[in-house]
Image: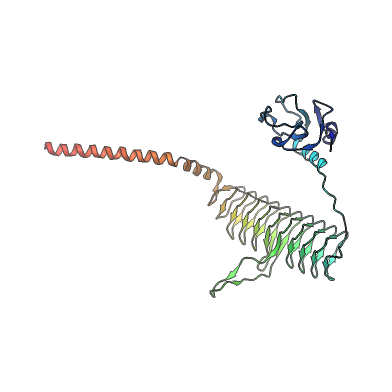
Amino acid sequence: MKVPLSQLAELTRGVLVGDPNCVIEKTAPLHTADSLSITFAEKPEKLDWNSVTNARAVVVPKNVVVAIPERFTLLKVDDVKAAFEAIAAFFHPKRALVRQGVSNKAYVSESATLGADVTIAPFASIGDDVVIGDGAVVHSGVTIMPGSSIGSHTVLFPNVVVYENCTIGSNCILHANCVIGAYGFGYDSSSGEHILAAQYGSVTIEDAVEIGACATIDRGAYDATVIGEGTKIDNHVMIAHNCKIGKRNLLCASVGVAGSVTTGDYVVMAGRVGVRDHLQIGAGATLGAMAGVMANVPAGARIVGIPATPEKEQMRKQVALAKLPETQKELRAMKKDLARALARLDALENKSDDER
C-alpha cells in the first residue's frame, strides 16, 4: 500500500512539515523503521535524531520544540499515540468477521437458547440449557457446558472451555484456550488421602472483561468466583476458587492469585505476581512485578519484592544490599584494626606489669 502523507494528515487532522509529496508504505516503531515507513515519537526532545531512526516520516506533538533534521517529514498532531494508532489501523485493517449463523458442523443442544445474529463456528459444542446473547461469536472448538450463559456481543476465541453453570457478561473477550469454571484446587486430606472438596459454586464474569490466552479461573466451592466489570486479564493468569476480583483491575502475564482473595477496584498486578490465599488487596493498589504478597495490602499502596513490602522500603533494602560487599570489606578492615589495637593494649599492660 502506497499512501501520500497528505492523506494521513487528513486522517489524523494533523499538520505536515516537510515534503508534501512524501509517500508512505508502512508503519513501524522508531528503531526498526526504514525509508518507506512512518513512525512516532511522543517525547522527541529525549531522542538523538541523528541515529534513532531511518523512518521517512514521524508523528510528533504539535507543540514540539526540539530541532529535528530536515530529512524527516513531520506530521504534527494533538495526540501522538491516538494518531499513530489510527494510521496503523489504516494500514492493517482487521479482517471483517463473516457472519455465518450456526454452522451445521457445530453441536447445539435443543434446549440451548440463541439470541439474534449469533455466530457459532464449526466444531463448537453448546450444551443443555445454555443461553447465548445477541451478536455473540463462538469460534471453532469452543465448549460451553450445560447451564452456562454468554452475554450479548461477547467473543469466545478457539478452544475456550466454559464449565457448567458459569455466567459471562456482555462485550467480553475470551482468548484462545482459556478455561472458565474448572474445579478449584481444594482437598480434604484428613483421611491421609487427598479427597476433592466441594465444587458446587460457579464463575461470574461481569461485562467488558477481557481474558487472555490460556488463563484459568476456577469455580467457587459453594459461591461464585467473580471477575468485576471492565477487568483485563493477561495470558497465563491463574485465579483460584472463591476469589472476588474488583472492577477494572489489570492482571498482567503469569499472575497467580490463590483462593478467597478479594481485590478492590483499579488494582494493578504486574507480571508474575503471586498472592497468598484469603488476602484483601485495597482499591488502587499496585503490586510490582514478581511480588510475593503475604499480607493484606492497603488501598493505594505500591508494593514490590519477596516478601512484598512498600516500594520505598524495598528500595532502601536494595540500596543496602548493593552496598553489602563494600560494607563487608569495611567491617573486615575494622576487625583487623581492632585486633591490632587490642594487641597494642595487651603489650602496654604487660610492660606495665614488668615495670612493677
The part of the image, by quadrant, that contains residue 336 is: top left
Relative vertical location of residue 192 with respect to residue 91 in this rendering, above or below? below
Relative vertical location of residue 250 with respect to residue 110 in this rendering, above or below? above
Please state, as top left, top right, bottom left or bottom right, where the N terminus lies in the image. Answer: top right
Would residue 242 be found to the left or right of residue 350 on screen? Answer: right
The part of the image, by quadrant, that contains residue 3 is: top right
Q: How many marks?
A: 0
**Which residue ends up furthest to the left in the rendered image?**
356
Residue 285 in the image, given as x and y percentages of width and height: 62, 49
Relative vertical location of residue 281 with respect to residue 12 in this rendering, above or below? below
Viewer-nearest residue: 242 or 76? 76
Relative vertical location of residue 228 with respect to residue 317 in this rendering, above or below? below
How are the colours assigned in the image?
rainbow
Viewer-nearest residue: 33 or 62? 33
The part of the image, by quadrant, that contains residue 43 is: top right
Residue 277 in the image, given as x and y percentages of width and height: 59, 60
Residue in the image at 74% along x and 34% along y? 34
Residue 105 in the image, given as x and y percentages of width and height: 84, 65
Residue 19 in the image, given as x and y percentages of width and height: 81, 26
Residue in the image at 82% along x and 35% along y? 12
Please state, as top left, top right, bottom left or bottom right, where the C terminus lies in the image. Answer: top left
Residue in the image at 72% along x and 31% along y? 54
Would residue 262 be found to the left or right of residue 125 on screen? Answer: left
Residue in the image at 74% along x and 60% along y? 160
